[in-house]
Amino acid sequence: MSITLYALDGCPYCEAVHDALEEHGIDYETVWVDGLHSERDEVKRVSGQRAVPVLVDDERGVTMNESENILTYVGTTLAAQ
């Protein structure tokens, strides 16, 4: 799987990204993270920070955070494949 989404259960920003990926029929894997920022070491390792959502597109070498940026990327890049 080349698309990975790091998300927190119940996070409205993460849910918006999930919805966009589903709406466009994009295959992805979700990594559910801990509610405590201090426990999000894997998110820190891949993105340099601990906030979610974080989208990793291994195929294109893209790692991004901020839901608005991710939603734009999903709509303009991933949905166009």
Image (cartoon, rainbow, N blue to C red):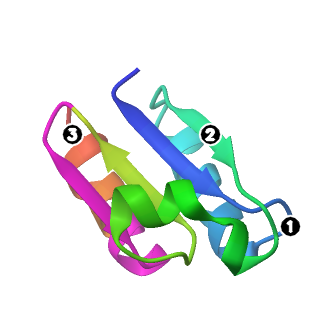
Residue located beneath label 3 in the image: 80
Element marked by disc 3:
loop
Q: Which residues are magenta?
A: 59-71
Decide which of tag 3 and tag 2 comes sooner along the chain.
2
Frontmost of labels 3 and 2 is 2
Residue at 51% in and 60% down: 43
Q: Which mark is residue 10?
A: 1
Identify the mark at residue 49; answer none if there is no mark.
none
Q: Of the residues shown, which amino acid type is indicated by label 1?
A: Gly
**Point 71% across, 67% down: residue:** 39
- The residue where tag 2 is placed is 30
**CA–CA distance in space, label 1 to label 3:** 28 Å
- Of residues 55 and 23, the one drawn nearer to the viewer in this rendering: 55
Q: Distance between the Cα atoms at labels 3 and 2? A: 21 Å
Q: Position of residue 22 (x, y in %)?
A: 59, 39
**Image position of 80 with respect to 68: above or below:** above
Which amino acid is tagged 3? Answer: Ala
Task: Assess disc 3: are there few (<14), some (14-19) or many (≥20) residues with their C-alpha within 10 Å of its C-alpha.
Answer: few
